[in-house]
Amino acid sequence: MGLGKLFDSNGRRQTSGSGAHNHCIELHGFAFQRLPQLHGFADNGLAPYCRRPKATMNKVFTNAQVALQDVLRDGMTLAIGGFGIAGIPHDLVDAVRASGVRNLFVICGTAGTDDFGVGALLQGGQVSRLASSYVGENKILERQFLSGQLQIDFTPQGTLAEKLRAGGAGIPAFYTKTGVGTVVAEGKETREFNGEQYLLETSLFADVSLVKAWKADQSGNLVYRYTARNFNPNVACASHMTIAEVETIVENGAIAPDAVHTPGIYTKRLVLSQGRKPIENLTLRKEA
């Protein structure tokens, strides 16, 4: 039954009528089953309840376009996992490009390459501002930055990771020694701790996070694989909505709790990857 049938308009529990004595209630999204009356407890509507399982919401979407169609808008902030092209959610990024949204603020560890990752969005002229730590593999980015078309928040790599982690943890800002005395510190507050200067950095929090994982269960618990893990766990917790592109989806309970990298509470939507795994730099052994 609904919460409104269990409590009156003043928030007081009902003690009479059918609403107070039904055997199942819903409270804060959890279902509770009323226990049989215990010896010594009067039947006054306050008999104990125990939590019982409730059906899990369906987080699996048919493809990236469907998962994104009602969340994308011009001027939004996107956080995208991956480094180089390892751990990039290629299908989700392609869906963003196909949507035509523009004036995006994108947060990512790197800018990808000319054809993959954030580079695909830069090709479409869809990014107006970028917060990143390494941009050296993207010629399109270089041209747009030098022409003034693209604003870049150059951020030390560890600082960027902490900005995302702090944002996901609800921490608005933190102090770090990285960047003190450099152009990174321009316009930012500094403070002395134990005789050392520290720089105040604000955290990052996006409208939507796009991540790539190796495995997920249907509740959205995520497991990353080797170096493709990189920025993905931090990105996954630093937004209002996280959408994960995964290589395989298993039943709930198939992933050991200790093996989970990103808990399902962060993951709102799942899409099965189409399996593209481009190679950034291909090196072949020379023929003897």
Image (cartoon, rainbow, N blue to C red):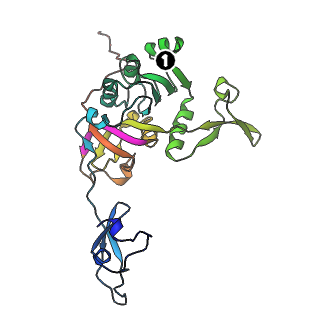
Instruction: Determine crowd level at label 1: few under 14, some 14-19, many 20+ residues with C-alpha closer than 10 A.
Output: few
- Magenta segment, which residues? 240-249
Q: Quadrant of the C terminus?
A: top left
Q: Residue at x 32, y 26 (%)?
A: 99
Q: Is residue 246 visible?
A: no
Quadrant of the drawing holding the N terminus: bottom left
Front-lying residue, 284 or 249: 249
Query: In terms of image quadrants, where is residue 246?
Result: top left
- Above or below, comparing residue 53 to residue 106 in the picture: below
Asked if residue 90 is among those painted magenta in the image, a careful observer would answer no
Confirm whether residue 54 shows in the render. yes
Relative to 33, is 173 above or below? Answer: above
Q: Position of residue 72 (x, y in %)?
A: 36, 33
Local secondary structure at mark 1: loop
Residue drawn at 38 percent across, 41 percent down: 242
Residue 178 sits in quarter: top right
Above-or-below relation of 59 to 2:
above
Q: Position of residue 31 (x, y in %)?
A: 31, 65
